[in-house]
Image: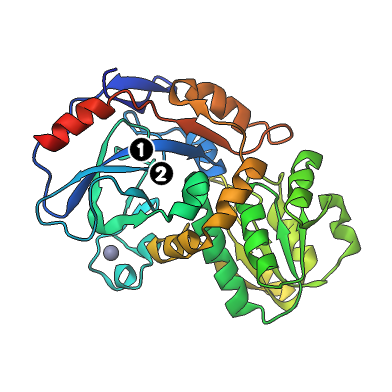
Amino acid sequence: MQDQAFSWRDGAYRATPLCAPPSELPAGSALVRPRELGICASDLLHIAEQPAAGAVFGHEWQGVIERVAADVESRCAGEAVTSSAFLGCGNCQACLRGCTNHCRKASVLGAGSLGAARSWLVLPAAQLQPIPRVAAAGAVLLEPASVAVEAGGVVQRLAGDGPVAVVGGGPIGLLTACWLHERGRLLTVFEPQPFRRGLAERLGLEARDSVAVEGHPGDFAAVVDCSSAYAGGPGGWQLCLRLVRRGGSLVAVAKYPKGRTVARTELARAGVCVAWLRGAGLAALRGAADWGAQLAAYRPVLADPALPLADLDEALRRARLPARHGKQVLLVPQADTSLGSTGQAG
Ligand SMILES: [Zn+2]
Ligand SMILES: [Zn+2]
């Protein structure tokens, strides 16, 4: 099978042929072959806002290093790896702290010409996170889990030990809730879809219908908004304001479509401190890798069985039906592995 990339053309992601990987890799880089991709609400929002022509799909991925540049010692061929969606410059203050999501020069996977929905990818070796063996089965969840680690860390810093509400029971909301629950936080998930509340319960979490919000005015020290336009229904952050106590914290993980914003005056009136997340960087991804075996156990609950990458359109259609489907995962065809190993020998 010919190497290919799925890029945006005429209103859809379409397969386009890809040349063979370069025989000589740039200094500091690694050639990786993605094996699985995840679809999330950020992708759906990106599509709703029309990607640029040629934009390649995919920011949640796990794969294998085929070979590394001659000067790379930190990583090696055959290693299972993933990366943050934010590939930092590696030199700025943010990157040195592992916060590649705050690097001003970061390239963002799946938002432009660089995406993981392709047979091969050349990435800076320093931006790759090894996948622990115990996490292998759940490795495609590492990127969304890193967002949960980032959000959970903010809650722990801001909200003492009071009860926490997570609004939106999509994969990010549920992973965030699991991370906090495992750390002993008293926690409730609010989610309008019965299907997703069922997933929460299978994960051992307490889940309530979003209409129950009215029964909990100001009950929570922190509220994590994981309701995007697609995950938790419209106006998620307004629900959050009803739940959070005066002097409490709102952690905004959800992304809002252009034109829909959080009214700062309303937040100020409610006396609520807001922390805005911008995805998660390499440090949070390391935290997610430490989650290991747990992620492997969560995968069958959170994700539907994987579809082949050629079914990207169908997977996107299912991702838009949160009342019936879990996270969508795509399998990247591996027919090129023998070609790849030839490349490695050469
Ligand atoms: Zn994502
Ligand atoms: Zn940087």
Q: Which residue is mark 1?
A: 34
- In terms of secondary structure, where does tag 1 sit? strand
Identified by mark 2, the residue type is Gln
Where residue 231 sits: x, y (%)? 66, 44
**Residue 265 visible in the current orientation:** no
**288 relative position to 213: left or right:** left
The residue nearer to you, when weighing 32 against 162, is: 32
Identified by mark 1, the residue type is Pro
The N terminus appears in which quarter of the rendering?
top left
Quadrant of res 36: top left
The residue nearer to you, when weighing 112 against 286, is: 286
Where residue 108 sits: x, y (%)? 35, 49
Instruction: State the residue at coordinates (12%, 47%).
Output: 26
- In terms of secondary structure, where does tag 2 sit? strand
Label for residue 62? Answer: 2
**124 relative position to 320: left or right:** left
Instruction: State the residue at coordinates (72%, 31%).
Output: 324
- Quick check: 148 above or below 338? below
Q: Is the Cβ of the residue at disc 1 closer than 8 Å to that at disc 2?
A: yes
- Quick check: 248 above or below 276? below
- Mark nearer the N terminus (1 vs 2): 1
The C terminus appears in which quarter of the rendering?
top left
Quadrant of res 196: top right
Quadrant of res 306: top right
